[in-house]
Amino acid sequence: MHAYRSHTCAELNKSNVGDTVRLSGWVHRVRDHGGLLFIDLRDTYGITQVMADPDSPVFAELEKVRSEWCIKIEGNVMARDESLVNKAIPTGEIEVFIRDLEVLGKADELPLMVFGDQEYPEETRLKYRFLDLRRDAMQQNMKLRSDVVRSMRQRMWDENFREYQTPIITASSPEGARDFLVPSRLHPGKFYALPQAPQQFKQLMMVAGYDKYFQIAPCFRDEDPRADRSPTDFYQLDMEMSFVEQQDVFDTIAPVLAGVFEEFGGGRKVDNPAEWPQISYRDAAKWYGSDKPDLRNPIKMQDCSEHFRGSGFAIFANLLENEGTEVRAIPAPTGGSRKFCDRMNKFAQGEGLPGMGYIFWRKQSADSIAQEQGISVKEVNAKIKAGEIVLGNEAAGPLAKNIGPERTEAIRQQLGLDVGDAAFFLGGKPKAFEAVAGRARNVIGEELNLLDKDRFAFAWIVDFPIYEQDEESGKIDFEHNPFSMPQGGLDALNGDPLEVLGYQYDLACNGYELVSGAVRNHKPEVMLKAFEIAGYGEEEVKERFGALYKAFQYGAPPHAGCAAGVDRIVMLLADQQNIREVVMFPMNQRAEDLMMNAPNDPSSDQLMELGLRVIPQD
């Protein structure tokens, strides 16, 4: 028999009754039933109930055992009484009578309980992550993560991709975030960088003729943390292909991801990847206020500017006289009550706005008809009874009163709304209010229960603009990936830079960006022109991106690719709101590892060896 176990804590069943077995694991729970001691023994596979009575030779030792002690037991498998069978676990038909016990590791008083679903402060959970990870929910999350990575890897091999590894220590390269720098001992005063992504290396592999590459790649970015983003490192399914166009990338990666979501999504609906919509970046901003829209929410915002131009609502009417402004409506089906409208006003004020204009539609009342026609309510009721007046719907709210019934009716018809519905309005230059409008759309969808929560809703976001202009300085700079091929190639770069679109794309799912990628710019003359528009001279491009620039002189093939965020995908599949729930050893909100005490102070010898000096901060 093996020194520690003959079976795992999930293997034993009725067929083992009478066997002598050896199990090792952690004491999950201890129960004393008046002379009978029961222990739920746990390992990573499951739980087995073990027990002893005073006749057991180790009963006295067993009484000393406490939660989370690591123990080894040997004993005989017995069938449970029919009335005591636990159908919730695979081992629920048996228990093991303990005849021998060895304590493999005692546990001090626990800073957090492993058994149960108690909530603990994040600081405690991260400081004692090795205990937190023993909890069942965390065990399931980490197993899910491992299974998802295995599935991704196999699916990529099935698509005839090969996995290659790229360097972890490299040169600093602008990828959109801050680098983590690593000082060089052999070259004092010089620094390596941890790669923000394998971007340049995978492009160089395409130039080298490797055609189909993928990697489950670690990436390092010194970023401000968010619930869906680590402040230090993350993993991505990285891929690149040669001799392909944008649609080829979609046709390759979409079935891989759809398969993963179908396999691990718990039965939630995944649309056919061939039917995932392709939405332009500008339309996504216009309709959803976001380039990562949650399409489980059916609300689609619309431009309602014409209904307010020259209207009695002076705020919008005056605003629309300025170039580049518009008024957008956020439909709110079933939101037609003053109480709900007031709640959304409060939301807008929390976003730093004075409020949101709104209209809601209700059934006409006799009072409003009487006021409109200048007759008494009694007369109105009589006419209703006689069939001379038919109650319709009416628009309510301050904004409706200002613009009048014809305009409100035109708005209602445009938005496809009815009695019991509402619409909210924001105006100005779209870039200034789109993000708030997008958040309002999300809140409205949640509050009115409009989301189809039993679904993963995917959408490709395409046609990203390559450049943007700073409003104050007028400077043109890259808005998105500088390595993307402009649509139209070199000719497109000879026109208005702000009209240049790139072959760049993201994949959104349920309000999160899961994939980002592009058709790469593989022509040196196009690369130089693209960077020249953003203010980078030829020598600077050659210095900062020398390897790529040189490689493009030697027969570079057309190539494209993307990267899918592993952490974020697992977070969605695990129904978690924070990425730290699916990362084994995450940092906290201040980018600190409370368990390993990182970052920490280097020793004087280390600094001397590297030729560095730390300047104290005031």
Image (cartoon, rainbow, N blue to C red):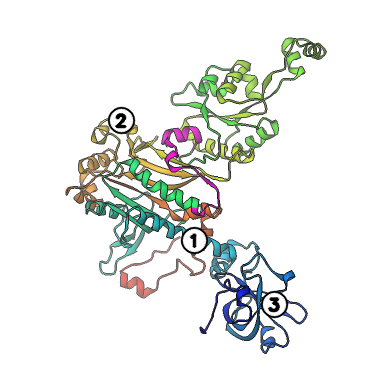
Residue 617 counted in the magenta span:
no
From the image, state whether disc 1 or disc 3 is nearer to you.
3
Q: In the depicted view, which residue is nearer to us: 444 or 528?
A: 444
Neighbour tally class for label 3: few under 14, some 14-19, many 20 plus, Cα within 10 Å = many
Q: Where residue 333 sits: x, y (%)?
A: 62, 31
Residue 233 appears in the picture as rendered: no
Comes first in the chain, label 3 or label 2: 3
Amino acid identity at mark 1: Val
For the point 27% across and 42% down, the residue is: 531
Q: Where residue 234 sits: x, y (%)?
A: 43, 57
- Looking at this view, name the residue that lies furthest to the left: 554
Q: Where residue 15 sits: x, y (%)?
A: 61, 75
What element does badge 1 sit on? loop
For the point 50% across and 36% down, the residue is: 289
Comes first in the chain, label 1 or label 2: 2
Q: In the depicted view, which residue is nearer to us: 580 or 390?
A: 390
Res. 583 mark: 1
Look at the image and give the residue range highlighted in magenta: 263-289
- Looking at this view, name the residue that lies furthest to the right: 378
Res. 496 mark: 2
Total marks in image: 3
Residue 287 counted in the magenta span:
yes
Amino acid identity at mark 2: Asp
Q: CA distance from mark 1 to mark 2?
A: 44 Å
Q: Which residue is mark 3?
A: 38
What element does badge 2 sit on? loop
Comes first in the chain, label 1 or label 3: 3
What element does badge 3 sit on? strand
